[in-house]
Image (cartoon, helix red, strand yellow):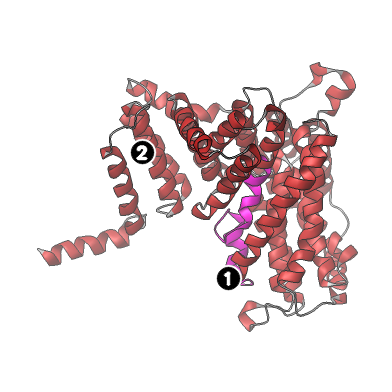
């Protein structure tokens, strides 16, 4: 009997598409939560949804299976358990409700558009151009990579595609040109420094534009809900508010990392020659690259609402409409084709897991869980007797540094942000609510600095072997604190000058 059980266990370990140990832990979490009586203030169905949600988050953190599969699991369980509705039809309608959300389709379509950057080679050309301009010293190359990130950020809502798929290959090519290779033990010549800059530019640029990372539209939605629609972040408002503190962070970051993890090779005159030779191989700007540039320019003007400013509000276009227009232009001009659209797995994967997590967050709010949690946290903070500056600092700090527990920014934001924003809106004086909201919005991207599993970009760059685990976490913690201070101090002054408080 014992041998038979071992044989069955070995079979499942070899055959099933999930990690058995983490799967058992996630299952135990679900069963334990379901056996706990619903707390005062929550209905049994609401508590069951909390159990499903927390189990999904645990399964994502433990990487039981790919995040899309975990999201599909949540959809199936919500549909079967009928915790959101009294009928199976109502439950599946609720489970699939978020897939009609325009914000989700904005992210999906923009990821599809970003495929054109790689296919046409425009992303590489932009990166090489900056290296040619700034690459005489290692520090200059760091600023070149940073500028490349900044230029691409408004158009690439997949921060993973931007930092890991476009900028990272450029960074590796430059490091290899200087014989800085982890396989040879020479990664510290320039590679470690450039890899860290490659990564840390990513969270900063993600904080600067709504369209720079997938969860930002969700942050916009949560800010509007927490303030009862009194403060709504448009694409332009977000970009303007984050402009000065974001640029200052980008200015300080390469220098700070240069001090925290200095490269062995300080002067790199060959980098300029390398960039020029690679651009020479690419030849002049191709027709498809020109179409990409023109499409990006058009989308940026429309996202910035320039037609409405010039011609009136009738010419205002929803950001998702703009994204679809851009995608259609690229397809009908042959810049990308329908096979490119179908084969962009990251876009369709994002649609599933992001849609499921948004659905869970929406249903938690609908069943009163967010308001219940917010009231409990509010009561605990009030009982502590803290003043409002301490309250704001605690809310921002706890939210940001709890990202050590998450392997997904979207999962973290879905799980915690709305509750924290709601408590802040209730306890912070009205005139200071907007800067608090903006700091939390920035923190939702800055928290990606912390770990090697913080977002999709981090395992790509960390996996290339240029940075040790200890160095990654050490630099990440320092940069997180530095960037939060910049946004808190400089950002607050900037937002005051803009008239937001």
Magenta stretch, main secondary structure, is helix
Residue 462 included in the magenta stretch of the image: yes
Upstream in the sequence, badge 1 or badge 2? 2
* Disc 2, SS: helix
Whole-percent x, y for residue 501 in the image = 77, 31
The reply, left or right, for residue 126 in relation to residue 448 is right
| 168 vs 141, nearest the viewer | 141
Give the crowd class for mark 2: few <14, some 14-19, many >=20 residues within 10 Å: many
Q: Which residue is mark 2?
A: 51
| 65 vs 273, nearest the viewer | 65
Whole-percent x, y for residue 418 in the image = 55, 34
* Disc 1, SS: helix
Inspect this view and state whether residue 337 appears. Answer: no
Which residue occupies 68% across, 48% down?
115
Inspect this view and state whether residue 8 appears. Answer: yes
Q: Which residue is mark 1?
A: 470
Which residue occupies 83% across, 22% down?
308
Region in magenta: 441-470
Quadrant of res 348: top right
Which residue occupies 52% across, 38% down?
381
Give the crowd class for mark 1: few <14, some 14-19, many >=20 residues within 10 Å: few
| 389 vs 217, nearest the viewer | 389
Whole-percent x, y for residue 468 in the image = 59, 72
Quadrant of res 299: top right
């Amino acid at each position: 009997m014992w041998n038979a059980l071992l044989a069955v266990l070995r079979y499942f370990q070899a055959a099933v598409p999930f990690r058995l140990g983490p799967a058992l832990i996630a299952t135990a979490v679900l069963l334990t939560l379901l056996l706990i009586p619903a707390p005062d203030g929550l209905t049994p169905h609401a508590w069951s949804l909390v159990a499903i949600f927390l189990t999904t988050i645990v399964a994502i953190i433990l990487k039981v299976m790919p995040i899309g599969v975990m999201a599909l699991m949540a959809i199936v369980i919500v549909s079967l358990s009928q915790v959101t509705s009294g009928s199976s039809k109502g439950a599946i309608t609720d489970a699939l409700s978020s897939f009609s959300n325009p914000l989700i389709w904005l992210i999906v379509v923009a990821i599809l558009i970003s495929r054109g950057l790689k296919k046409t080679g425009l992303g590489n050309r932009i990166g090489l151009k900056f290296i040619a301009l700034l690459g005489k010293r290692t520090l200059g190359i760091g600023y070149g990579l940073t500028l490349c990130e900044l230029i691409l950020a408004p158009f690439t809502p997949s921060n993973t595609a931007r930092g890991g798929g476009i900028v990272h290959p450029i960074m590796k090519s430059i490091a290899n040109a200087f014989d800085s290779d982890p396989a040879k033990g020479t990664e510290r010549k320039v590679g470690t420094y450039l890899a860290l800059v490659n990564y840390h530019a990513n969270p900063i640029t993600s904080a600067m534009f709504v369209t720079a990372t997938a969860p930002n539209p969700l942050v916009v939605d949560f800010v509007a809900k927490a303030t009862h629609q009194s403060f709504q972040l448009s694409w332009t408002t977000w970009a303007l508010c984050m402009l000065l503190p974001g640029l200052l962070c980008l200015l300080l970051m390469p220098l700070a990392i240069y001090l925290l993890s200095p490269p062995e090779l300080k002067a790199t005159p060959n980098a300029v020659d390398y960039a020029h030779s690679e651009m020479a191989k690419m030849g002049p700007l191709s027709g498809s690259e020109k179409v990409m540039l023109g499409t990006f320019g058009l989308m940026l003007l429309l996202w910035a609402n320039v037609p409405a400013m010039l011609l009136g509000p009738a010419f205002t276009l929803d950001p998702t409409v703009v994204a679809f227009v851009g995608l259609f232009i690229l397809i009908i001009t042959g810049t990308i084709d329908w096979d490119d659209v179908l084969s962009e797995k990251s876009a369709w994967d994002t649609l599933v897991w992001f849609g499921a997590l948004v659905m869970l967050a929406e249903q938690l709010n609908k069943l009163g869980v967010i308001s219940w949690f917010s009231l409990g946290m509010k009561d605990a903070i009030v009982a502590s007797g803290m003043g409002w500056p301490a309250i704001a600092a605690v809310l921002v700090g706890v939210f940001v540094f709890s990202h050590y527990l998450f392997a997904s920014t979207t999962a973290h934001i879905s799980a915690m942000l709305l509750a924290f924003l709601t408590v802040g809106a209730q306890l912070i004086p009205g005139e200071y609510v907007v800067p608090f909201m903006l700091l939390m919005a920035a923190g939702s991207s800055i928290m990606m600095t912390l770990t090697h599993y913080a977002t999709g970009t981090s395992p790509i760059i960390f996996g290339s072997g240029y940075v040790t685990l200890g160095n990654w976490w050490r630099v990440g913690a320092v940069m997180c604190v530095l960037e939060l201070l910049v946004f808190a101090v400089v950002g607050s002054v900037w937002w005051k000058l803009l008239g937001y408080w």
